Image (cartoon, rainbow, N blue to C red):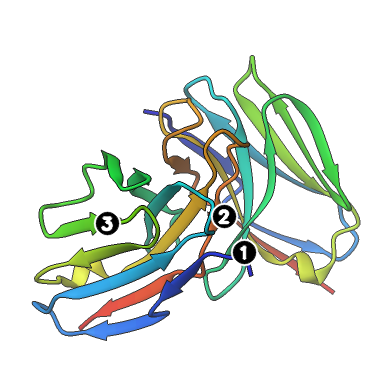
């Protein structure tokens, strides 16, 4: 069964700062997910990646398959980026089964 | 709105009562997942279906929990004889087989057991 470690657990930064959230996992995977959760519970998928790097607006996700490590970066952070960011990987590495989640990083961006 | 709906959004019940939650996935998605999230933690996998077949169950799913997907469309999750430790957000997600691994999450049902 895959295990996921995320860091930091809490992060407070000033508007405009460059943000990095890290995720490590234990079992080789087909793809890694970055998710965003706002107060109230709704989860939105930000990225799903199996290699290299993806960019969407001010968000960038990278993955190193050999190191079993991924990072989520936010450039020019804004208070509306405040949310919980969660890394998730397939339970046993394959794509068909459920996900194992990190505990999440609670991000607060202060104006 | 991801296209996955859950009902009810909130449920308050007394210990010992039975509760049932419903999830309606995106219509063409044949895989459906249930997760549970307690306060301050990431979600935890409970079970998943491919069409109407329940293919995997977590050890977290005690015998008080049962999930069904009778016609391969909507799914229900029932908890019998609820305990205070069952208080959590219950999340449903769906995805299409043969496509990308992306799962689409519903808004969740928040259960409070008094």
Instruction: State which mark lies toward you, 3 or 2.
Output: 3
Give the alpha-carbon distance from disc 1 to disc 3, as whole Å: 23 Å
Q: Which mark is drawn over residue B2? A: 1
Cβ–Cβ below 8 Å for labels 1 and 2?
A: yes
User: x, y percentage for residue B107?
Assistant: 51, 70
User: x, y percentage for residue B104?
Assistant: 57, 55
Check chain identity for marks 1 and 3: say if they share one: yes
Residue A27 showing in the rendered view: yes
Q: Residues within 10 Å of mark 2 (few under 14, many from 20)?
A: many
**Residue bearing mark 2:** B104
**Residue bearing mark 3:** B70
Image check: B86 left or right of B32? left
User: x, y percentage for residue A30?
Assistant: 57, 25
Image check: A22 left or right of B52? right
Q: Between disc 3 and disc 2, whose residue precedes?
A: 3
Q: Is residue B84 above or below residue B95?
A: below
Number of numbered discs visible in the structure rendering: 3
Check chain identity for marks 3 and 2: say if they share one: yes
Residue B39 showing in the rendered view: no
Q: Is residue B19 above or below residue A85?
A: below
């Amino acid at each position: 069964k895959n295990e996921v470690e995320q860091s930091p657990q809490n992060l407070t930064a000033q508007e405009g700062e460059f943000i990095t959230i890290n995720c490590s996992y234990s079992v080789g995977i087909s793809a890694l997910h970055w998710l965003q959760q706002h107060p109230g519970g709704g989860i939105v998928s930000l990225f799903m990646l199996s290699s290299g790097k993806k960019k969407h607006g001010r968000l960038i996700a990278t993955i190193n398959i050999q190191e079993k490590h991924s990072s989520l970066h936010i450039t020019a952070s804004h208070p509306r980026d405040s949310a919980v960011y969660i890394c998730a990987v397939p339970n046993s590495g394959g794509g068909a089964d459920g996900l194992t989640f990190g505990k999440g990083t609670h991000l607060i961006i202060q104006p | 709105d991801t296209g996955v709906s859950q009902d009810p959004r909130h449920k308050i019940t007394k210990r010992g009562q039975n509760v049932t939650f419903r999830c309606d996935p995106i219509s063409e998605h044949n895989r459906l997942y249930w997760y549970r999230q307690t306060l301050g933690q990431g979600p935890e996998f409970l079970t998943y279906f491919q069409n109407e077949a329940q293919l995997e169950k977590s050890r977290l799913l005690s015998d008080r929990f049962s999930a069904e997907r009778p016609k391969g469309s909507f799914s229900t999750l029932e908890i019998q004889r609820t305990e205070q430790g069952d208080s959590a957000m219950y999340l449903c997600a769906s995805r299409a087989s043969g496509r990308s691994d992306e799962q689409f999450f519903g808004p969740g049902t928040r259960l409070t057991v008094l």
